[in-house]
Amino acid sequence: MGKSNKCKAKKQSYISVPSQIITSLSSSSLQSLLLSPKKAHLNSSFFVGHNYSCRRPRVCLSALFLFVLVGLLRLGWNVNTLVLCSQSFGSNTGKVGERDHQVLVTSQLHSPRPLHLESEFWKQPDGMGYRPCLELSAKYRKAREAILNGRSKYLLVVVSGGMNQQRNQIVDAVVIARILGAALVVPVLQVNIIWGDESEFSDIFDLGHFKRVLADDVRILSSLPSTHVMTRPVVENRTPLHVSPQWIRSRYLKRINKEGLLLLRGLDSRLSKGLPPDLQKLRCKVAFQALRFAPPILELGNKLARRMQSKGPYLALHLRIEKDVWVRTGCLPGLSKEYDEIVHNERRRHPEFLTAKSNLSYHERKLAGLCPLNAFEVTRLLKALGAPRSARIYWAGGRPLGGKEALSPLTREFPHFYNKEGLALPGELEPFANKASFMAAIDYIVSEKSDVFMASHGGNMGHAIQSICRA
């Protein structure tokens, strides 16, 4: 569904992929689309009738003449007819989609799409009435003085996961500090066990800007004051999912008032999405105003976005086909038995990586729409949505399992295919080498400035970009 980016002069369309569409792109559905039973039935009926008519030569010749004539007329009117080929990749090990897919072969004659069809794809939605609204109530503003002047309660937070997951936890940490009336010490970014990124908050985000924007909401400290350095904090590692402000107060307020220091870990999706209006507005303020990337990241991200914009509109595609994604989701890439075995072995060595429900098989997950779309499926979806072959696509994401081969269905149909490595000039990415959070931040910036955004799988980045104008 498209949502207009009305917060800025430039609008943006978003394409979300519901599970029903993902389910429809399963291998069985692909086969049913490629080989239409209805057409097969009509063809078989024709040939049965034809065999019967051939007992009478004149009728046979007349029917054959009409059949050839109609065929020539159809060929003349439909030069670029799509040919559905039922050839399977089963015998070609190592080819993309060898077990799951049949091939959609396009005619070699690629006539340009009519201009009105191309412009329709880039057409921006009307925004559905969304507009920025961060006006806070008098009650919220009245509590400001007591919260900002407090010197007895401090909240420490350790956030984990990838960059976009960390962003969400930082947002909720600010809201929890406001609920408890506590000062928030700048969140600690836990070293990611998958990417090994040791970046700190100020490496990725503009700390000075973060403090200034939230100066009227929560007191932000760079470090714990000396009066509390030796204090043993109350540690909470198991906050339930989707808790309310009332739960937060009943669980933590008495303890933080007594000890003065509370340490929270694992805040991902812990705070309810249905907060009171003032707290929900604070959440939006943190996410879309306070959390600005550090100047070096912002500068390079904007440069790459301008390079994409220099030749017209572009689509940003958040493609989730890295090895860790297949391992975590319990799904398979659909490349070959070799790559499936790589995923299975990694999952056996690190069962803690599997975040999906372990009681579902791969095929059950696929049919339920819980698996990422691979490059073949994304290609089909983009073509069905009317993306022109000339569309310029920015691919956001890490190195795909299978390398260039995994991307070949997309690059064949959409040759104007770029990523940050391809757009950056020599040396521009060197300061961010081996820093996954920096690379994810650059992808976020270029995607946020695109004309159309689409994610191949539900995730924190896609949800954040889709929500930009709801603040």
Image (cartoon, grey):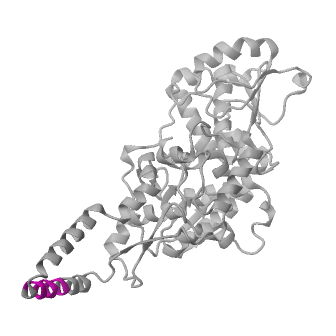
Instruction: Name the quadrant containing residue 221.
Output: top right
Q: In this orientation, which residue lies closer to the viewer: 86 or 413?
A: 86
Residue in view at x 62 percent, y 20 percent: 143
Give percent across and percent down for residue 242: 58, 26
Instruction: Name the quadrant containing residue 229.
Output: top right
| Horizontal side, residue 380 vs residue 318: left or right | left
| Horizontal side, residue 361 vs residue 2: left or right | right
Give percent across and percent down for residue 56: 8, 84
Residue in view at x 35 percent, y 75 percent: 82
Check residue 399 for magenta coloring. Answer: no
Q: In this orientation, which residue lies closer to the viewer: 58 or 115?
A: 58
Residue in view at x 68 percent, y 19 percent: 146
| Horizontal side, residue 36 vs residue 352: left or right | left
Q: In this orientation, which residue lies closer to the viewer: 89 or 273?
A: 89
Secondary structure mainly formed by the magenta segment: helix
Q: Residue furthest front?
A: 55
Give percent across and percent down for residue 319: 58, 58
Give above or below for 466 relative to 212.
below
Give percent across and percent down for residue 13: 44, 56
Q: In this orientation, which residue lies closer to the viewer: 293 or 331?
A: 331
Residue in view at x 59 percent, y 23 percent: 243
Observer able to see residue 401: no
Observer able to see residue 394: yes
Residue range highlighted in magenta: 59-69
Give the number of marks: 0
